[in-house]
Amino acid sequence: MEPDKFRESRQAINRLCKKIDLLIEQKELEASTEGHTEVCSWLDILKPQAKGEIQKRSVKNLGIKIKGLSNLIAKLKPKKKSAVKREPKIAIIWDEERLEQLSPIFLKKVFKNMEDDTKARVCFGTTGKGIRPSYQIEFVNQETKAFTGSGHKPKTKSFSPGTQNISQPFSHEVIDSILHGKQ
């Protein structure tokens, strides 16, 4: 290759290497990777055109420089994406129609946990999918017990009073009538 054209190409590659080096310092992974790809393609074009020992050595040195940049780029970590703002979850609104959609087996276990207290009331959790909701039973003696929806096992902690994660109470009679309507 003609010495002047070779020098211009070599200098252009060196300028691009400096830009990539700055991008690496700024921890710009994506931009430095794109620049590296571009500079590699320029070197691939220049390599076969190198004539003579000096040009071949110059191309080899550029290759070493580009390899060094590649190692620095490999050490960069991608920038953390900003936290995805989640849509506020829509609370389940429990009414008798929604209760009728629960499986009879689930409702039988809820009814069994209400014991024989005909004045007991049950409230359901308003989070989740509404298939097997957690629930809390308020007995006539002012005692409350919370249960898991999946295994109907007593929970150690009841729902907080005044929380929005619990439905309005449903009486023993309502649960009984829904159950008898499903059988």
Image (spheres, helix red, strand yellow):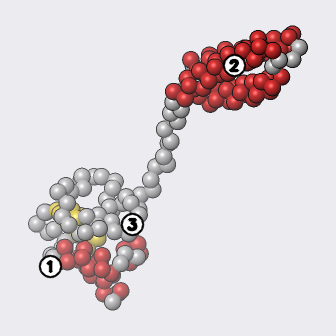
Q: Residues within 10 Å of mark 1 (few under 14, many from 20)?
A: few
Q: Quadrant of the C terminus?
A: bottom left
Residue 79 seen: no
Q: Can you tell which mark lies on residue 181? A: none
Q: Which label lies toward us, 2 or 1?
A: 2
Q: Give left or right: position of 161 versus 46.
A: left
**Residue matched to label 2:** 60
Q: Give the amino acid at mark 2.
A: Lys
Q: Can you tell which mark lies on residue 130? A: 3
The alpha-carbon separation of the residues under discs 2 and 1 comes to: 89 Å
Which quadrant holds residue 146?
bottom left
Which quadrant holds residue 118?
bottom left
Residue 61 seen: yes
Which residue is at 28% across, 52% downward? 162
Q: Residue 135: image x %, image y %?
A: 27, 65
In the picture shown, does residue 58 fall above or below 140? Answer: above
Which residue is at 81% across, 11% downward? 7
